Each structure stands twice: as structure tokens, then as C-alpha cells.
Image (cartoon, rainbow, N blue to C red):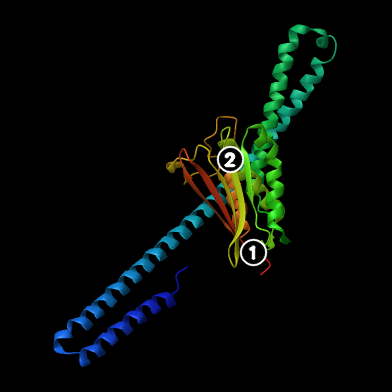
Amino acid sequence: MISASTIKRNTLGATALVLLAVGLAHILPPHWLFLPVMLALGACLTSFRRVAEIVDRVRQEKCDLDEQLIQSQKLAAIGELSSGIAHEINNPLAVISQEAEWMTHLLGQPPLGDQPELLEVRDSVKQIEKQVDRCRTITHKLLNFARRMDPVYQVEDLSSLVADMSILVEREAANRDVSLIRDFPADLPGVCTDAPLLRQVILNLLTNALQAVGRGGFIRVTARQCDPGHVEIRVEDNGMGIPKENLTKIFNPFFTTKEPGQGTGLGLSMCHAIVDRLGGRIGVESTVGKGTVFTVTLPIQSAGRA
């Protein structure tokens, strides 16, 4: 955030130059008087330009903070709604699951179990059970998204944490001929955070990157200290990229560009909610046809332990 002292420092600098110009005007010959005038005008213009740049940066920072606040409020409201919907859906799902299990049991008993013409019925019941399980998974994600979990802070080795998550996608990346590049400095400081929550975020970002990259592509995951009080985790891929019109929507619950049945649209919204709870921020940069970079910035010393 731009401080008032920065603006004051620029203003005082310009004032000093103007006073110097006035002093020179008293000692220079008349035909040199244009020099202090030009010096004073230049000082004023430079000061005005710097102040204008500072004001623009302050406005941009305010807009960014407003967008983060709106996103957090939106996620909170949708989380409450999702919780109610998930509970209402779970009850009929339980009944459907029980009835499907009972049908499977009956179809396995004689004389029904010996009738090959009922094979198609058995397959249909198995499909019902499969789709019920899928719906149950979605409702559990909704409940996890809505649940307000207070982070349990401990000092963690960020390099090891990120490396462990990258190992989980390493085999699938190799099967798809995707290079997984890791870059963790040895002197990365310990971070006070909730390791299980942070693991969810990293694994989700790596999984999304793997789904976006074609054969022969790459995923680069890095961790570094970006300033004295923060660390940064970046997950970069050279996949298909995200269209500009979708960049403002990707953290919204249920928004997804995947094929039907391939995603719930809750992964990135959960990442946003978790990073927000950990006192950090998550951002994205993407170019269609070139790839995407997700950046997670976290405080080294958590607000809960400060």
C-alpha cells in the first residue's frame, strides 16, 4: 500500500528544488534567469507526475481489495446456500442407495439370479449405484466448501510439502509424457500454516494443470520467498490457457469449462476459500494457447500465531 510519507517525500523534494531555483534567481546574471525558472517548472512537473502515478497505484490497489472482498462475500453466501442444498439432496440419495442395494440383493437370489435375460437390469442397477456415489461425492464437496474450518497452524517445511504433492501427480504426468519441473530453494524459511488445507490447494492446482496440458507439455511448480514476510507458490503449465472472459469467473463455485461429468466447478473456489482462511491470496495469469500460471502468496508468520 502506498503510504502518505511517500507522497510527502515527493512533494518536499519538489519544494526544495523550487526554493533552490528562487535562490539562484538572486545571484545569477539577468540573461541567465531562465535557468531557475525552467528548473522550478521541471521540478513541479516531475512532482505532479509522480503524485499522479502514486494516486493511480492507490486506486488500483483499492480496486483489487474491493474485488477480493466481493469474491469473499460471494463465496460465503454461496457456501451457506450450498450447505442447505447438500443436506436436502443427501436424504433422497440415501434412500435411492438403499433401494438399489436391495434390488441388487434380490436380483442375485434364485430364481432371479439364474436368469440371463435380467443381466441388463443388473447393469442398470449398478449404473444407478455408480451415479448415486458420484452425487454423494459432489454433496460432500459442497459441505466441505461451506464448512468454516479454523486452520490449525504449525511451522511447516514448504519445500517438502510442495514436493510431496508433486509426487502424487508424478506417475500420471509420466504416463501422459508431461514434464514435471520442480524448483525449491534450500534456504526457504519455515511457514506457519495449516498443512492439510494447503496440501488440498497445491494438489488441486497440480491436477488442474495436468488436465490442461497435452502430451509433451510441462508443468513447473516453484516455491520461493517473495519478500521478508511472504512466500509464493507458483504452478505454471503450457496448456491451452484460459480465455480472458473466464478469468474473472474461475473462482466462482460451479463454474467449469470441462466436459460434463469431468468436473464439479468447486475445486478452484475451495482453493480460494482455503487460501483466504490462511491469510493469503491466490491469483491467475493466462494466455490462450500459451498456458496458465496460478500464484499462491502466504504469510510466513500466520495472523493466528502473530
Left or right: where does residue 254 sit relative to residue 123? left
Q: Is residue 187 visible?
A: yes
Front residue of this view, candidates 132 and 277: 277
Which amino acid type is marked by label 2? Phe
Seen in the picture, residue 179 relative to 14 is either above or below; the reply is above
The C terminus is located in which quarter?
A: bottom right
Seen in the picture, residue 52 relative to 180 is either above or below; the reply is below
Q: Residue at the spot x=79%, y=22% of the render?
A: 102
Q: Quadrant of residue 188?
A: bottom right
SS assignment at label 1: loop
Left or right: where does residue 197 sit relative to residue 258? right
Seen in the picture, residue 105 relative to 6 is either above or below; the reply is above
Residue underneath mark 1: 300
Where residue 174 sits in the image (x, y, percent)? 67, 35
Q: Is residue 150 visible?
A: no
Do the numbered discs 1 and 2 sit on residues whose CB atoms are within 8 Å?
no
Where residue 166 sits in the image (x, y, percent)? 68, 45
Where residue 300 sits in the image (x, y, percent)? 64, 64
Which amino acid type is marked by label 1? Ile
SS assignment at label 2: strand
Q: Residue at the spot x=41%, y=66% of the render?
A: 58
Q: Residue at the spot x=55%, y=33% of the render?
A: 258
Q: Residue furthest bottom?
A: 27
> What whole-number distance in Å separates the C-alpha atoms at marks 1 and 2?
29 Å
Mark 1 / mark 2, whichever is N-terminal: 2
Disc number for residue 62: none
For disc 1, the neighbor class at 10 Å (few under 14, some 14 to 19, many from 20) is many
Q: Residue at the spot x=78%, y=20% of the render?
A: 104
Residue underneath mark 2: 218
